[in-house]
Image (cartoon, grey):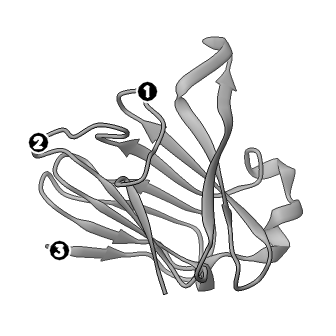
Amino acid sequence: MPTYYGTDGSDKIAGSGGKDALAGGKGIDYYYGGAGNDAFVLKLSDFDPALNNNTSIGAKAQDFIYDFHGAGVYEAGNNDFLYLSGFGAGSTITFTGYGYNGASPGGDIHAQYYTIHSTTTGLDYVVAVGSVNGNQLKLGDYNFYN
């Protein structure tokens, strides 16, 4: 499985047409997994607590996943995964709402915001997930590793 890495700045990280791992690094990162069973690696050490108060970056999201495939269901050959690292035992990820745009003023079910609560820092971090099928993430779409 090839791994694509970002830098300590804001990055656009794209996978291939197969199974990939994408790890952003520090900064506000934009992930495009493409086809295949992709793993999006989000590390606590890459999140900046100072950005939690910056509402100009889209509901305070620090990372954006544009094409999460297989949310809530199994899709053979196209089933993505969130690998959450270093957030601490007992950390949680919670759906917090849908994104809005001019084309979908009532809410876009594909643009979803999630809050990751870290028991290591006691802080919350927001990520945006573009669910290709419109389903919300559920256990099996993500896991915490310490």
The answer to which of marks 2 and 3 sits earlier in the sequence is 3
In space, the residues marked 2 and 3 are separated at their CA atoms by 19 Å
Look at discs 3 and 1 and give the one toward the viewer: 1
In space, the residues marked 2 and 1 are separated at their CA atoms by 17 Å
In space, the residues marked 3 and 1 are separated at their CA atoms by 27 Å
Mark 1 residue type: Gly
Tell me if mark 1 has few (under 14), some (14-19) or many (20+) residues whose alpha carbon lies within 10 angstroms of its own.
some
Do the numbered discs 2 and 3 sit on residues whose CB atoms are within 8 Å?
A: no
Identify which residue is drawn at 15% across, 60% down. Answer: 19
Q: Which residue is mark 2?
A: 76
Instruction: Tell me, for residue 2, which label it has, or none.
Output: 3
In which quadrant of the rendered view does residue 132 lie? top left
Identify which residue is drawn at 85% across, 50% down. Answer: 55
Identify which residue is drawn at 58% across, 68% down. Answer: 10
Residue 11 locus on image (x, y percent): 50, 66
Mark 3 residue type: Pro
| 129 over 81 or under it: above or below | above
In which quadrant of the rendered view does residue 125 lie? bottom right
Q: Quadrant of the N terminus?
A: bottom left
Do the numbered discs 3 and 1 sit on residues whose CB atoms are within 8 Å?
A: no
Q: Nearer the viewer, residue 133 or 95?
A: 95
Question: Relative to residue 8, is residue 52 drawn left or right?
Answer: right
Identify which residue is drawn at 46% across, 44% down. Answer: 137
Instruction: Tell me, for residue 134, which label it has, or none.
Output: 1
Tell me if mark 2 has few (under 14), some (14-19) or many (20+) residues whose alpha carbon lies within 10 angstroms of its own.
few
The answer to which of marks 3 and 1 sits earlier in the sequence is 3
Instruction: Tell me, for residue 25, which label it has, or none.
Output: none
Kind of element beneath mark 2:
loop
